Image (cartoon, coloured by chain):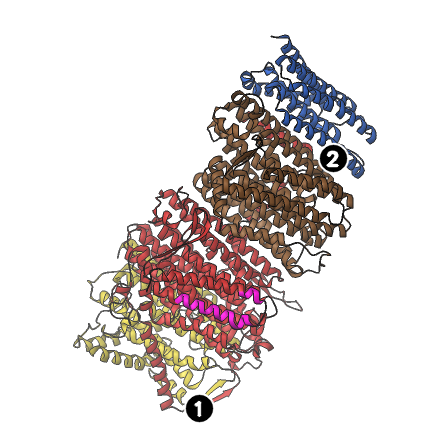
Chain colours: A yellow, B blue, C red, D brown
Amino acid sequence: MNGILLQLFQDTLVVLVAPILLGWVNQCRAWLQNRSGAGVLQPYRVLIKLFHKDAVLANNASPLFRSTPYILFSSMWLAAALVPVIATDLPLSPAVDVIALVGIFAVARAFISLAAMDIGTSFGSLGARREMLVGFLAEPALLMVFFTASVISHSTSLVTIVETLAHKQFMLYPSLAFAAVAFVMVLLAENARVPVDNPSTHLELTMIHEAMILEYSARHLALIEWAGAIKLLAYITIGIALFVPWGIAEAGDWGALPLALVALFLKLMAAGAGLALLETLSAKLRIFRVPEFLGTAFLLAVLAMLVHYLLGV
Amino acid sequence: MAFSQQLINLFAALLLLIAFAMLSQRRILSLINLFALQGLMLSVSTAIVAWSSHQHHLYYSAALTLIVKVVALPWLLHRLIRKLDLKWDVETIINIPSTMLVGLALVVFAFNLALPISQLAGTITRSTLGIALASVLLSFLMMITRRQAVPQVIGFLAMENGLFFAATSATYGMPLVVELGIALDVLVGSFIFGIFFFHIRDTFDSLDIKNMENLKEN
Amino acid sequence: MTTPNLPIDIALGVIIYWLLLAVAGLLLQNSRAISQWIFPAGAAGALVLAVSALSSLGGAINVAVLPLGLPDLPFHLRLDSLSAFFLLLLGAASIGISLYSAGYFRHMEGGSLGLLCFEYHIFLAAMALVFLADDAYLFMVAWESMALSSYFLVTTDHNIPETRRAGFLYLLIAHVGAVAILMSFGVMQGGHGDYTFSTMRNAHLTEFWASVTFLLALFGFGAKAGILPLHVWLPEAHPAAPSPVSAMMSGIMLKTAIYGILRVSFDLLGMPLWWWGVLALSLGLATALYGVLFAAVQTDMKRLLAYSSIENIGIILVGIGLGLVFHALNKDALAALALTATLYHALNHSFMKGLLFLGTGSVLHATGERDMGKLGGLIHSMPKLALLVLVGALALAGLPPLNGFMSEWLLLQAFLLSPDLPLPYLNMLVPIAAAALVLAAALAGYVMVKFYGVIFLGQPRMEKTAKAHDIGAWELLGMGWLALGCLLLGLFPVFVIFNLDHVTLMLVGKTLGSTAAQTGWLLLTPIQPERASYSPLVLLVIIVIGVLFTLFVVKKFYHGRLRRGPAWDCGFPAQTARMQDTAEGFGQPIRQIFEQVLGVIREVPSPYDKKPHYHGETRDLFWDLIYLPIAWVAERISALIGKLQQGRIPIYLLYSFVTLIALLAFVR
Amino acid sequence: MEIILILGIPLLGGLLLAVFGGHRWAPELNVVMSLGTFVASAWLTARIIANGPITAYNEQFFIDPFNVFLVTLTAFVALTTALFSSPYMHNEAAHGKLSAGRLRLYHSMYQLFTFTMLLALTTNNMGILWVAMEAATLTTVMLVSLYRTPASLEAAWKYFILCGVGIAQALFGTILLYFAAEKVLGAGGTALLWTHLNVVKAQLEPTVLSLAFVFLLVGYGTKVGLAPLHNWLPDAHAEGPTPISAVLSGLLLNVALYAVVRSKVLVDGALGTHFAGNLLMGFGLLSLVLAAFFLSRQKDIKRLFAYSSIEHMGIITFAFGMGGSVATFAALLHMTMHSLTKSAIFFAVGHAAQKSGTQMMENIRGLIKTNPTIGWGLALGSLAILGMPPFGVFASEFMIITTAMHEHAWATPFILVALGVAFAAIFSKVQTMVFGETELPRLPHPPALVPVFVHLALVLMLGLYIPPYLADWYRQAAAMIG
């Protein structure tokens, strides 16, 4: 019962917090770029605006096109709900382990790409093609990052991984260091951030994510944007869970929960700021440098696993 | 050594000599004559064997040889070349001295090969087995080195002579029914050869076998 | 079960029934009855076979001897769990394909439908016999009958030269492979002169000969399965064949090779050596990556699927390799896991690939076009087909909660649970292999998005595409069955694994089912709940609830106003169908990244060209690396040998003479 | 009594047809005589099944498990070939290719050839065996040049010379054999009787017998078509009329091999070593490999299948060479399968070539379209001869390859390569002929395809089921051959 309550709490939390996190990242970026910024609640304002608008749908849009935003939103929600962010006692987590988690991301990617191709515009298919290009390298890299953590903790269950890493004797894992670098690179690519993609422009030479959602409007667009924010949150919380899990509440330990919440918010803020810093410091890559970038991430992740086998830690 | 055996050895040596002569002979007519002579040697030596070993069926063999190989076949061949109006000279593929050298080597080889067998033979003619084998191989060599159909056939018939001689010298001849069969085959074979000569001549205007090199793989 | 031999009698009965249907097809020639009655009747037979095979999984081993075959070697048949599993696969997949054929082949009435029906059912019966054979001779007879009947099926459209070429290549490689298999049986019989499998099981081979056998078998079966570098026939033959036949070849026939490898390496040879597994693993990875890369750059939809089959065979082989390694190192529980994943994937692949090939058949039938670059927008004209194909495509892309993901998940678990092998190098290999495997799986997603997106989505690129008719009832039934299979196999893994247990118990002596279901049927836990768990049903339910909830909230709190208008496309004014990505365009990034591997040939027009023409092509490198050199060498040798035959009598006589002299000298 | 009939009917047929062979109904008479021979041989077979091996006429003839099936097979193939030859010759006559005189020659020689084959098989006398083999050459040589084209004359001449010379070596071998036997059995009639020789074979002088075997092998091996003595074979097969190609391939090669194997039995007994077997294996393998590589160079359809015959003779010889019950069994089975299949192929090929008016494969197209039966006959026949199950050729190849893999593993790579190359060569060519489009006309006389399909059905049946008495013969013969 406690578990279910906790699960519902986390579900609500991630949905609500995600836009704020996105706003925070954008705000940090604005500060770093010497701009004043729109405030951390700006994403909410955008969502509300979009939900109120009339939807315009292309004449030849198929049911696939219309259902994709919902599928996307709900799968991202599920993904974020699965990551142990404040406590490890989540009843849903046995249903989905890290591999399935990557699978959920892949489902979302496949649907958004298919939807992008549905209207049959040049930009749509271009975006889909690029998204799949990013995906086919980022997905294995992410899996390999997970695998490194899995072989350390002898489990692919995210909860077990977090528990093992959080409560083990403090140890330096060189393999995890490699994995962390790879993970950050994947995170940048998967969430359409600089240097892989730039969420704030519509430049046909470089855009990926934006090219795919050009034909969406109003509530559909709102759902997609929201899903994007949840995705970012999910990724960051995954990073936190894997690499800095300390402070998380153990199963049944209600007393530790407030502390865990505080720890989470601090970590999220730090991560958001770090992300903004990274984005500010790097330049957008040409689209054909992206495979090299992600290839590096993939190799680093494989290396992380190899290092684990080599050093035994 | 008994006188008959000496005689047989003499004829065997003559047989080999004729085989060599055929190997070196360019003229078709002479070839036919040599072939007839070889048949005669064979027939006589068979008769001597028959006489000395009291193998009566060998008389039949000798007679058969005389009729088929000394009379019938040379006569047929003579008629043929007259009808076909053949050139006198026959070209060889390898020049004659080298052919002779190879022939010599073959004789040595054949003698060596026949040596252990000859020792087993209980016949008075046993030493001639090597000669028989040698003349078979020499005829073979002759067939290889001739470019025309008729000398090839003569080589073939000479080979048959060698075989016949081998049969006589090693075993006093094969059983009669077999020998009759062989003779029949030789006769029919020669008949067919004759028919072929005409067909070939009609088709190719010559009996040169270099016209018959079209079925090949390269 | 009433009598112990009932299952094998039923299986034999179905085989005979199929043979009778084959003859009936031949007698009926080209009448309507063939598509109306014979194909559905064949499907009914398949259903019986599948049910009886399912019920006999884990039952007693059935044997039968038919008074046919060689004098000292009557046909031995045996139905054990391995055979039963593959018979189940055959039956289950062919139900769908036969039903579909009933509708699909109607357009061939008046052509050579009778002949096709004959070959089709012979093909089915031969495959069933392959799984039942318990001696080398029957196995080979069934094996080659299968190759032969499928060859004639492939060359159905024999007036197209490419089809003939494809058929020839197919049969040639199949035949060479069959001779290799035959040789491996030759080693295995161990000089007893007895070719029954039971003798082979008991024969004790030295390590060297066992390895020779394994390599020969891997070569032979690999030729049928399409393992690198023997895969070249596959992308030629599959597109050439009529689509149900492609579905059958890809979905079922390739699995006969998997069956063969399993049968030989786990059952007949007894204890494997660990390096066999490493070899199979490496070959499998290479095959998977190579297949999926080529699939990504194809423009012909059936070729794309053929390459995707190569990829999946690679994945299955990876599982076998892993199983061999574990089994050889006495980690049988892990071997059971790897084999479960392998068998599961084999079953899944036959459903997904069958479904997709049937889908291409309907597309081809409706539009007459195989080039994806000329299709597009079919989701509007063929919505039923589009939905069914979507299921197959998502499954093949390895997306949860469908079945493709399920088996890949199990395989990855096998990798992750594999540390602490006693050989350090092997431990190193595991991460690299896992990395390659996930790379292949991720690329499969790329391929499937391309496949589905280019064919079904976007705007129609041709007039007739827009007016294409949707599939008929038989087709719907057949494809629906397979799609349902994809869904159920993905959602209820625990039940599937329980049935697979009988097979792994037979092969490696361990099972997975009891541990897999330790927390109930809903949750799949291959080893322990803490180590890994997955519940596709929960996942699906949550996503569905999420979708419904979101929909409800959005509808409840906001207006549902919707306007239709032309596509926006950043405001570009002129929108034509030609501006969408073609198959070539969609594959372009892959082509660019892997240019060296793919052997890209490109003709780019000059800027001053009046009629610019672009041509891009990817060549299979193995043609240039292996096949053409072999052909060249063979030709050189035969040219050289041809010189022996000069046509000159003296030379011929000389040959005889020299032979004679040489032999005589030898005897001396 | 049966033996008299078996030999007498074709002899009588030869004489009758020498007189009436040019008549319109001569092909049918040919069929009738062949049918008579076949009935007689079937009668003989029935008696052998009932009573076991027999010798007859002062032991001059004998029938044992080794030759009984060959006699039946020979009579059977002779019958079906006669059946095929009837419409074939009608068509040839309709095309104006043959005159009445030539037809007379053809029919008469056809019967005489059958006679020589059956004589060679049934005789107990190694000398008569030789005589019959030589006579077989003589009867067929005129048939090879039946069309009197330059190429056919050339082929016939080569056939005559090469086989003549070859068979002469066999005579020398026979003399040596007699020479050795005479020591043990005494001079006279019995010393060449195989049954007697077989009894005393262990006492025969080994040196002489090994020499004798070399001569016999080179001699009869020429007729078998063992490389490098095979050179006459493709020419003779390609240029003669197709029924003759069918019987040459289907019967003559078998009978010549039969002679070799009979000799091998004696030599093995005398030497007690694997000498003869090794020679046979060497020749077999060489023929197999060489023929396989020749195949891909062929343009003429009959030449193609002639080389395929060499290839198969190579396989059989190799199997006899390996020895042992399984391999010999397989060799005997393969002899049967090869003659049935190859003659069936030649029947189909004959009609295909008649239809297209050429033997050049590049001009033969789309047989399945216009004459499905010819097309299917050729396609299935080729697949059968290439060792595709369920056809019976595979059954024997199965046993040969598996045995070789175990006992002579070094040879199997050669076999694998040769079979692969042969498959590629033959099948690529057959496929283009069978499939595709064509505008060729139909034949004036309907083709006789019953023989093709009867043969293929038999081959198919033997691939799936071998009658027990046939298996018994093979087994007993294999035990005798060793």
Image location of residue A113, percent across then percent down: 45, 74
The residue that disc 1 covers is C561
Q: Is residue C294 visible?
A: no
**Three-letter residue code for mark 2:** Lys
Q: Residue C42 colored magenta?
A: yes
Horizontal side of D175 relative to B81 (left or right) equals left
Image location of residue D156, percent across then percent down: 71, 38
Q: Are marks 1 and 2 on the same chain?
A: no
Residue B14's place in the image compared with D415, above or below, is above
The residue that disc 2 covers is B210
Residue D278's place in the image compared with C231, above or below, is above
Q: Chain of mark 1?
A: C
Secondary structure beneath dot 2 equals: helix
**Three-letter residue code for mark 1:** Arg
Please identify the quarter of the rendering in which residue A26 is found.
bottom left
Is C456 in front, or is D219?
D219
Horizontal side of C340 relative to C619 (left or right) equals left
